Image (cartoon, helix red, strand yellow):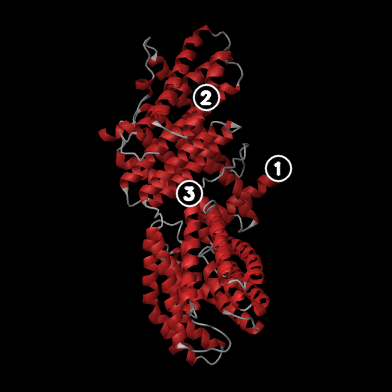
Amino acid sequence: MHAQLGALMKAAVVGVRLPDWLRKRPGWLDHQTAIGLTFAVKTFAASLLALYVAFWAGLDDPRWAFLTVFVVSQPDSGLVLAKGFYRILGTIAGILVSIALAFGLAQYGELFVAALAVWICFCNFAARAVRNFASYGFQLAGYTVAIIGIPAALNPAGAYPLVVARFTEIVLGIISAALVSRLFLVRALSPKLVELVRALTRRADSFATALLDPDATHERVTAERTELVQTYLDVQAMQHSTYFESAEARILDQPLRGLTQAAVELCTTAAAVANHRGDSRARPEEKSSFSVGISHGSKSRTGDGPIVSALVRAADERDLTLARVRLRDCMEAFDRGKELPGPNVGYRLWSDPVPALLTGIRSALAVVISSAFWFATAWPTGSTAIVVAANVTSLLAPLEQPDKISMAAAGTVLIAAVPVFATQFYLLPLAVDFPSMAVALAPLMLTCGFIMAQPRIGALGLLSAVYFVFASSIDNVMTYDAVAFLNSSLAILVGIAVAVVLFATFFPETPAYAGRRFLRQLSVHLSDLTSDQPWALALRGYQRALFEQLGTTLARVKDEPKVAHECLTSAVTALSTAQAIGRLKSSLDGRVLPPGIAAKGSRLLVRLSQTLRNPSDWKFSRRAVEARALSLHALATDPGSAEPEETLALRGVIVASATLGSDLMRARRIMQGQSNAIPI
């Protein structure tokens, strides 16, 4: 069975290697313009298919099937399947809650709005705990209740048919998008993921080389690190979606994760080694944060500092060699279609409850404010403003600078109003059948699809498509009401305006705030590492989660180089501290140490956990002193040891406690702001 699985995996690897895959399709199809045109045609064709079936079936509101295609469509086929899967889950959850609210609270308007706000708050809170399309699923479960629940509450007698119709239309749109994306001009994710993981391994090796090269410039190290983190984030985002693509992609999933883990281990090991050696490439003002060498922090009155430094260098060289060998072996095994034996490292992404709670409360406030305006004015399209406000505060909260993006969204609506109005009132009235309707829709929707395929402005194309569907009621029997169109457009702008105000005034997530929360996450999860078992898996999980969180944070603070540097400084210190904790726990787990040293080591880990939970300058100093005392105690005991295992464990304690003491003093200086760092 194992041989068959290996053969199948080898066939999958060979089948998705990028050069072979490229020969199966013209090269020009991978040009960004060709990708945009292909995506626009495929998406428009899928939307027409969904719209035609909705017309044929006589569904209540066919525009939802049409819109769903644009919402779930992605240039890569695997992304369509992944997004569609989570959209179905989110829609089911939202529909169940919509039924409960519509039938239980429809007659109590204020209670209905309050329950809606609480549900959206909960969903957005949960959405910040996960990533990628899983987060989108939670968000969708929240604002689906606004989309479906409000119309159902306004017409309780027709609530059930409306809920069933909306669900049918959304599922129809997902199926149409999935069919077209998988049957015509398929863009598979697996070859891209394989090549991306290979690029990650190359970048990891290049980064480690640059980091440990005394002649490498600070600019080179920074550039290598930035590219590495971005590639890692791309790999993580793509791996979750590729799993839905095919059986071959699922077979490749675990080997690719092993390669990714090996690359991360090499980078984190190199960062810790560079931290211990002292970074001679840093500018003088940076050396206090990056370059506190072990030898400076480990000297004792008896002159044992050189001995400790030699032990640390030997341990670092051993770990670095093992990490390089592990990465090379993983690459060779992957090329041969084999999988190296090893533990399946599962790790939990870091979720910060404070920004998550603020996101939930902000979304709830958006619903309450727009609902109050609706109740006070009895505005016919006030429900649309509620839906838009809920959507914008949900979808844009995880992004950097959501207030500016919201303002860009408002500008997009104003610009798109002209072509949308022209399509609705000048082109669609000329249509006499479905083909002519398709021709009338083509200029606007193909343009939206092409914009959606562009990485930097794709969201603006989707927003334009959503605006058109919301403002124009596409149906078998068309009605053209300019007043209703203007009311819908105004409602969309009002909803966006509510979101802009809340993003700007209600605890805005500034770069400085994002940096402080990142440092807090480093400390809290480092505290968890002191007690997690088994320690090796916990350490690997911490490293991968830190990489992911660092990339996410750097994206939010990219316009603030000082904050970005502070985050990187603290991340390097945290990685070195995590390695020191892992070494100490490894030595303590052997049960061959003298009882006194084992007790001191265990007591140090307990106190360190408490310190990391509630950090302070004085506590870090005390833990650093205790770590260095433990190192000296172990060093004094080492010559009298006769057992090789005990000698090895004692030297592990010496290295771990010495590096831990230096890392804690470095963390103390960061807290004091001596390296321009943000206080934790």
- Within 10 Å of disc 3 (Cα), the crowding (few <14, some 14-19, many 20+) is few
Residue 189: tell me if it is visible.
no
Which of the 4 image quarters holds residue 55? Answer: bottom right
Q: Amino acid at mark 3?
A: Val
Check whether the beta carbons of the residues at disc 3 and disc 2 lie within 8 A of each other. Answer: no
Residue picked out by circle 1: 2
- Give me the residue at 52% from left, 84% from top: 438
- Give me the residue at 67% from left, 71% from top: 103
- Within 10 Å of disc 1 (Cα), the crowding (few <14, some 14-19, many 20+) is few
Vertical side of 403 occupied by 530: above or below: above
- Within 10 Å of disc 2 (Cα), the crowding (few <14, some 14-19, many 20+) is many
* Cα–Cα gap, marks 2 and 1: 37 Å
Q: Quadrant of the N terminus?
A: top right
Q: Which mark is residue 584?
A: 2
Vertical side of 112 occupied by 581: above or below: above
- Mark 3 element type: helix
Earlier-in-chain disc, 3 versus 2: 3
- Give me the residue at 45% from left, 68% from top: 452
Q: Position of residue 584 (x, y in %)?
A: 52, 24
Q: Which mark is residue 354?
A: 3
